[in-house]
Amino acid sequence: MLPVLSALRGLLPRGGLARGSVVTVAEFGLLALALLAAASAAGTWCGIAGIPEAGVLAAVGLGLDADRTLLVPDPGDAWPQVVSSLIDGCELVLLRPPGRAPAPVRQRLEAALRRGRGVLLVAGDWPGAQVRLRVVNQGWTGLGDGHGQLRACCAEVVADGRGEAAMTRTHWLWLPGEDGGVAVADPADIPVADWPVADIPAADTVRRLSPVRAG
Amino acid sequence: MRAHRPGALVPEIPRIMVLRCSGLCDPGAPSRLGAPSRLGAPSRLAAPGPRAAELFEQVIAAVTGFCPEVEAVQPGVCAFGARGPARYFGGETALAGQVIAAVAELGVESRAGVADGLFAALLAARSAGPASADPANVNPATRGAGPSSTSPVDAGPPLVLVIPPGRTAEFLARQPVSVLEDQDLAGLLTRLGLRTLGDLAALPAGDVAGRFGPAGETAHRLASGQGSRPLAAAPPAEDLSVTREFDPPEPLAEPVVFAAKALAEQMHDSLAARGLTCVRVQVQATWADGRESHRLWRHDGLLSPAGVAGRVRWQLDGWRVPADGTDTSDGGIAVLRLVPDQVVRATGRQLALWGEAAVSDRVARSAMHIQAMLGHESVLRPVPGGGRDFWERVTLVPFGEKTEPRLAAGPPWPGRVMGPAPGVVYPFAREADVTDEAGAAVTVTGRCVLSAAPAWLAVDGDPPRQVTGWAGPWPLSERWWDPVAARRRARFQLLTGDGRAWLAAVQDGRWLVEAGYW
């Protein structure tokens, strides 16, 4: 089991990334980077393949250790071989496949994963993934109509999957919170419409959420 | 022996002698003070013509008689550590006189300069002799005695300029900033009233770095008499590469890999016998059909012969993967050649090869396997540093090279966007259209006045998103002193109806999306 940030434990069966498994995130973003953070901080090497726009600074802010990170921005047409090599070196690999992965390719990679006791985090679709995560709603605080500055983001994350992960779970998270970290948000406070930004003290962040709409 | 405070931690700056052969050097050539020399490829020194290159090789051979480790700095200019030989030959001036005399026997006229560090020694050699740009610039007391009595050169203006130990900073301070390699920077410094290296060195290093970036930092270090790179020495004109020919060409990878192991052993032995080691190894393979493939592997003494063989195997595998599904009937390997690159003296000290974090064999193997398939620049390590844009605050370094940020994190970077970092940073900003309620494009004037509040954001072909919140414009004017790199931008944070936030900018009247917060 590879560790995840404490706020993310509730999303995953048994509270971590099971070795040898595939976990998907519907779209690349902060959630995918946050899933790397705790394992990287604990000494695991992370590989990021096929995502040239990965925001390394944000990932570092969440806890990723840049010294133990390999980037392969453009794995090209031979990406299954590249990812297979990357799995040999890095226990945690975040991949956005450049194309649809045929079943034999997926099976080969899953076998390599079980052999190397690693975890493959896929940004996109991967039939047969043990856990699937997606952000269904998000709203940023701090930005007004011509004034302010982004401060924190509240995101609703839904998890489902196969086997012990089959039950659908929904969590609200600060991703990121005002301190740059990830924290569990209290659904009772979310969301509040019609928030007059200027009238509210800076510390009261939850009430300054913008109206959240379905993404 | 130098005027440093006792106890102050000052890196040892070696005494360097530079010999400048007037007929062989190309006065217009850049001095390459900062760049590491590539001694594996002596032909690169042949700029003024093959005859001159040949003569220069003879010059280096002659100088090797005085000091075994001579570095060719640029065509017609070579350098070596002066301390040891000077002790043996009776002082730096006497040593220089003898070297000049020895070179004169080849029919080559030369000047010598001795100082603390390579940069100052190069300048001293340039200032020595009748070709000196401005004799008033040089303290006459430091002039050498000129050619010794054994010299066939007639007595004339002194050919040697020795800057006494500890007085290099004084000598450098009098030099005009135009001696810097970076002529753009020199021009700018002159316009700012900084006419000599002394003026530049007098400024705080942090301020110079903050204002002029890495180029300024380097110039400041040089001007303060620090920062000259150490000499990379190698025996001249000696081919240290090892070659194996296959006749008939070898179609299978395995025998080639086996031969590579033997070749690597041979190369290690021949380097070790000379007290040398190399930083990188170039593997060259020639196929029977004439195709050639080269790849550089960083080496640093860590690679056992088996390690070299492993890299050859990956390299061959990588080349055999048909890039476009074409037939791989290449006829097999005809020639395999290992060329040691960046040959340096073996110090027994391992350089920090992979950066601070220890890279395990497992990770290194995996990264190099991918590099063999896709090329050296395909596997990158991110290095957070300084800068104003999110993309420039992370330097991407090919795996195996030194991990250093392009921009130092130390100095403040006014104008950078505060708040959380975006999860998505586009390597190339995406074109966008931002329109107001009426559907007209939102514009920003030179004084940062907005034509109307943004209402719609259409990113690079995506359907338009409604803007539900925004802030800006935050003006940013960068590198105004450099007409090529200068940029003026007004930046915005935009919030769209789908809950996403964007970092956008207006530059030259166009909207660009630089990053996304999700």
Image: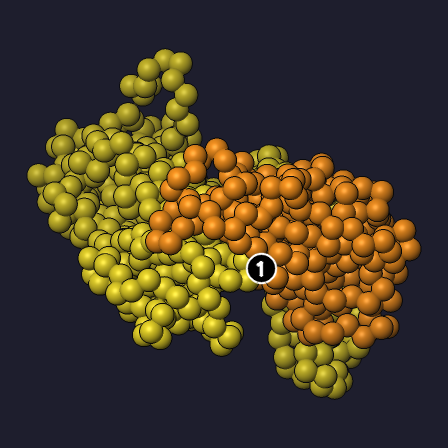
Chain colours: A orange, B yellow
Seen from the viewer's position, the closer of residues A51 and B441 is B441
Q: Image check: B344 left or right of B256? A: left
Q: Specify whether residue B57 is in view.
A: no
Task: Residue type at mark 1: give it.
Answer: Arg
Rendered position, A147 above or below B259: above
Give percent across and percent down for residue A99: 70, 74
Can you name the residue that lies furthest to the top here?
B6
Give percent across and percent down for residue B387: 40, 47
Rendered position, B43 above or below B223: below
Q: Image check: B164 left or right of B63? A: left
Residue in view at x 54 percent, y 47 percent: A192
Can you name the residue that lies furthest to the front here?
A194
Q: Specify whether residue B446 is in view.
A: yes
Q: Which quarter of the rendered picture does the N terminus of chain A lie within?
A: top right
Rendered position, A186 above or below B169: below
Q: Which quarter of the rendered picture does the C terminus of chain A lie within?
A: bottom right
Indicate the quadrant where residue B48 lies: bottom left
Can you name the residue that lies furthest to the right here?
A163
Residue in view at x 82 percent, y 70 percent: A105
Residue located beneath label 1 in the image: A213
Give percent across and percent down for residue B23: 25, 59
> Which element type, helix, strand or loop, lies under badge 1?
loop
Seen from the viewer's position, the closer of residues A132 and B404 is A132
Indicate the quadrant where residue A132 lies: bottom right
Seen from the viewer's position, the closer of residues B415 and B293 is B415
Other-residue count near label 1 (Cα within 10 Å), few / some / many at <14 / 14–19 / ≥20: few
